Image (spheres, coloured by chain):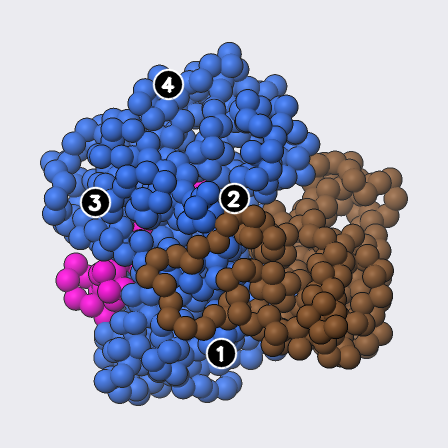
Chain colours: A blue, B brown
Amino acid sequence: MQQHQYDVIIVGAGGAGMRAALESSKRTRTAVLTKLYPTRSHTGAAQGGMCAALANVEEDNWEWHTFDTVKGGDFLVDQDAAEVMCREAVDAVLDLEKMGLPFNRTAEGKIDQRFFGGHTRNHGEAVVRRSCFAADRTGHMILQTLYQQCIKQNVEFFNEYYVLDLLMTDGKASGVVAYELVTGELHVFSAKSVIFASGGFGKVFRTTSNAHTLTGDGMGIVWRKGLPLEDMEFFQFHPTGLAGLGVLLSEAARGEGGILRNKDNERFMERYAPTVKDLAPRDMVARAMANEVREGRGCGPDGAYVMLDLTHLEPAHIDAKLPDITEFARTYLGVEPYTEQIPVFPTAHYAMGGIPTNIKGEALANNEDVIPGLYAAGEVACVSVHGANRLGTNSLLDINVFGRRAGIAAAEYAATAQFEELPADPEAYVVELVEGLRTSTGEERIAAIRADLQATMDLNAQVYRTEGSLKQALVDIEALKLRFANVGVQDKGKRFNTDLLEAVELGFLLDLAEVLVVSALERKESRGGHFREDYDKRDDVNFMRHTMAYREVDADGNETIRLDYKPVVQTRYKPMERKY
Amino acid sequence: MDVKVKILRYNPEVVDEAEWKTYSVTLQPTDRVLDALHKVKWEQDGTLTFRRSCAHGVCGSDAMRINGRNRLACKTLIKDLNPEKEITVEPIKGLPVLKDLVVDMEPFFDAYRAVMPFLVTSGHEPTRERIQSQADRDRFDDTTKCILCAACTTSCPVFWSDGQYFGPQAIVGAHRFIFDSRDEGTEQRLEILNDKEGVWRCRTTFNCTDACPRGIEVTKAIQEVKRALIFRRV
């Protein structure tokens, strides 16, 4: 075991982690621990853009953006946080440009902007061009630009170090324990501040746009410490995943004029959202698509998907604005988007919930109290700027605004805080976890348990949910947890043991799936990404509140999930019916 | 269909030398080579080791040598490989193998970091964005697509035989800034690449261009950097 000491430790090197690192490492001694090489992070898969009211191509202001964010989130958004995000969005985009990000340009050479779902002019009057973009690879450009700046600034990375535990001393964060993948060695990092920026957990679902590595490690670690997770029932299903595969096709396809059609070639979104049509927020479009399929208007031999139609767009326009996603259609489905419609179906995309934080990025121990030294930013966190449904582009914004804020706050805290004494045997939990799995001789296969988990989640906790389906999911998860206790890891070595890694990741997925389902069962209403067929209306009287889930362990070691609730912060906007 | 996949296995904890092992897996023609590797790992042999993340060609984790050519496993479909014959998979060449298909990426990233792959500017920053025409933006568009997968660098015969050569990717990384109208670091960057292990080692083999899973015209970018060096100096 090796020991290290840094003022600030950042867990994860996607957009939020690296944006935090740029701030923190300017101010104090900082290390970034990541289970992947930084440029492999899933920020790089984001496509369509990052919204900010630059008003480069038409009138716009950040207050309209705030309103859209709150309404898009079905009024579960904390409005103080949304104001911060939308106000700071302008500088966040300009900062990236100054770092070198190659945005597409207007005729005058300014940053170009385009339409995106749910982003409107003057509180819903019409769609507005607010998304700043670099073709359909905006996330790729953000990830590369931030990594380039980290190189320039000599940020210290520990690549392929898998953080498996958070160390706490007297209720304060005091470090982390990491497993070095290449050697199998454990490393204890003592730190004054720890920032989690480790992304989401889309791999609880089978059909997902998420990377194989998005297994909710950060949320899982915090959860096992008895710290709360907020609004875990809210998971976004992106309307346009490649049918059968889940590979993301950006909403920019519709922002650039693409249209969704059913088997009768009908532009069905006109029925669901007469004003903004195909550019309605994602939850509404995803449900509309699923509904078309359920009512027998789906396409293909099994009627299992709908079509994304780009054939009326000029090929040159497609090449300039949507080159990557059209290549995905060609590569994976053999479809030529110039002349053929593309089969699409909703794909699990984004966790609105996560580690509760305030607007400085400080993690919360309950509804009020911050955990000194602990921070979270990006998809792993719940500020909550996305409420019940995130608007497209607001995730790239979130990582930049709150990554920056968490980096500053963590470094400032470290400037005056002392290193806490680490707990005795700081690595004990991780040794038990890792060695327990590595030496296990169980019969169960990791991949089989994971596939069964993903199958039940897709079937029972996806776009449409009922009490019955969620209870079934819960029964299935409990059974899978029992099977997981008997899981076998075939690779017994120390060196680059990805078999072991997958087993650990599966443990986190099982924990988080359970939190998601338990939270969803108790939310007896429909709001944003959480749709209950048995309670198909939003219920502001009983459920205008965030879910706070806690893991509790009794004297016999039995685990239970306790749910509590937290009020929503409302400033300017009163809840209204959500029509588009 | 049943497909035979022959994989070059190597675990220095267990054996001294790499050896080929053949696995039989059932696949759809539209499955990817990554699916084949997952089937082996998940259903037959959990010790098989490779990197992967996004699984759709944007993260750059799974560059490997498939039927003798560098490609991304997640972007290579079985039907495009003649599945009647055995499919061979081995690690990319020229970087130390850590285990099975996993190589040590540090020398590769060292080369990238050495070419100053970041925007260099002087003076005060403008209040708003820097102005850049779309034409100037398009000038370096091709090289912004790079995902640092190393398929190009590890397909280059000069890189295989010469451990000092920067390799195609680092030159692509430099090109992206040399031809960016906002950048002021061109002289320094060109000086780095004017080194004897710099662009002049390129023998225009075009392996790199063939290997790039993002369709970047790598050889062309290298030639443009050579030309920039000549015309600024002559």
Discs 4 and 2 lie in a common subunit = yes
Q: Residue visible at 46% across and 87% down? A: A3
Front label number (4 vs 2): 2
Location of mark 3 (residue): A63
Q: Chain of mark 4?
A: A
Q: Earlier in the sequence, mark 1 or mark 2?
A: 2
The three-letter code of the residue at mark 4 reads Glu
Residue A463 appears left or right of A344: left
Discs 3 and 2 lie in a common subunit = yes
Location of mark 2 (residue): A136
Secondary element type, mark 1 = loop
Q: Earlier in the sequence, mark 1 or mark 3?
A: 3
Residue A452 appears left or right of A363: right
Image height of A246 relative to B65, above or below: above
Secondary element type, mark 2 = loop
Q: Residue visible at 44% across and 55% down? A: B131
Q: What crowding class fits label 4: few (fewer than 14 Cα within 10 Å), some (14-19), or many (20 or more)?
A: few
Q: Earlier in the sequence, mark 1 or mark 4?
A: 1
Q: Earlier in the sequence, mark 4 or mark 3?
A: 3
The three-letter code of the residue at mark 3 reads Glu
